[in-house]
Image: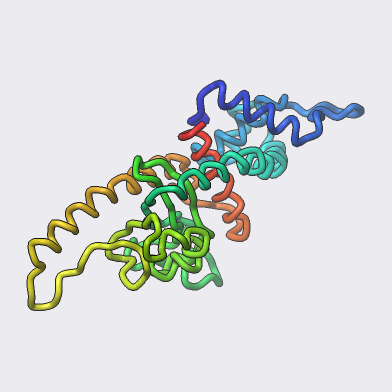
């Protein structure tokens, strides 16, 4: 239901309990219908499966309004509970080369919101920049950008270029990307010139880079197994950055923990 091992869920419950100050059930008045363990599992389930709150309520034996209250209370705490661990992983990853690529987190068409439609992907949503190590493990995501943003521009707007600046500098560990990042300081292949052919060396370099890049595509495939990033975010667009931070922390914890 959660995508995490049982021991990982138990550790998260303990961390959330500590962030709550050791209090989940009120001392006076009506007790919450779900204990903390089941409440954390419910919150993880909604992010992993992206079911409606009504369906989740039926599965966990509570009302939709109760589900909404629990999720709004616990989702930020899950983000906080994984933040330090995710930060440590990013620090470790900065010692070697990394890979970057973007994907679309669909939101559907929203009235009065412009710039969300991606002509490349033929859907509306957020352009999310993801960074992975050479083994295909997620290490970072940037701030969500409108889906119409090109990857080369989103790299800067998402904050990835600033956070990983040393990798983009000459002599740095290196950030490897596809041809969508031409014009940035990332390491990319060579585009075929109009009316000419690539040299044998250029083709060999493109093959080597594409072989390495398969790892970041694998990392993104695992990330979007959190279906809230894959089957469509139905909530307020202003809440999506927090959701992305939470899911990023959880995926890093799942992969590296």
Residue 76 percent coordinates (x, y): 67, 45
Say whether residue 156 is left or right of residue 21: left
Q: How is the image coloured?
A: rainbow
Say whether residue 171 is left or right of residue 251: left
Q: Can residue 51 be seen?
A: no
Residue at x 65% of width, y 42% of height: 75
Front residue (pair 215, 51) = 215
Q: Residue furthest front?
A: 171
Q: In this figure, what is the number of numbered marks?
A: 0
Residue at x 82% of width, y 29% of height: 23
Residue at x 32% of width, y 45% of height: 215
Q: Residue furthest top?
A: 6
Residue 92 percent coordinates (x, y): 49, 43
Say whether residue 127 is left or right of residue 249: left
Find residue 241 and report its image quarter.
Answer: bottom right
Residue 217 percent coordinates (x, y): 33, 48
Q: Residue furthest right?
A: 28
Front residue (pair 138, 95) = 95
Find residue 100 and report its image quarter.
Answer: bottom left
Front residue (pair 241, 90) = 90
Find residue 238 and report its image quarter.
Answer: bottom right
Residue at x 63% of width, y 30% of height: 12
Q: Can residue 96 be seen?
A: yes
Residue 169 percent coordinates (x, y): 41, 65
């Amino acid at each position: 239901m959660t995508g995490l091992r049982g021991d990982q869920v138990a550790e998260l419950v303990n961390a959330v309990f500590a962030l709550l100050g050791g209090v989940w059930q009120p001392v006076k008045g009506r007790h919450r219908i779900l204990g903390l363990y089941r409440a954390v599992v419910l919150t993880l389930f909604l992010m992993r499966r992206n079911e409606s709150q009504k369906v989740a309520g039926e599965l966990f034996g509570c009302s939709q309004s109760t589900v909404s209250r629990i999720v709004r209370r616990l989702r930020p705490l899950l983000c906080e509970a994984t933040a330090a661990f995710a930060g440590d992983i990013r620090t470790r990853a900065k010692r070697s080369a990394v890979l970057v690529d973007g994907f679309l987190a669909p939101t559907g068409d929203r009235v009065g919101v412009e710039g969300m439609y991606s002509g490349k992907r033929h859907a509306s949503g957020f352009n999310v920049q993801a960074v992975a190590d050479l083994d295909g493990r997620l290490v970072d995501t940037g701030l969500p950008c409108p889906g119409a943003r090109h990857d080369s521009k989103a790299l800067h707007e998402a904050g990835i270029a600033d956070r990983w600046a040393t990798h983009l500098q000459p002599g740095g560990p290196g950030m490897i990307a596809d041809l969508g990042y031409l014009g940035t300081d990332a390491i990319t292949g060579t585009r075929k010139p109009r009316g000419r052919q690539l040299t044998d060396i250029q083709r060999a370099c493109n093959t080597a880079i594409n072989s390495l890049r398969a790892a970041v595509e694998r990392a993104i495939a695992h990330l979007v197994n959190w279906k809230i990033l894959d089957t469509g975010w139905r909530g307020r667009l202003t809440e999506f950055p927090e959701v992305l931070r939470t899911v990023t922390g959880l995926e890093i914890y799942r992969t590296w923990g």
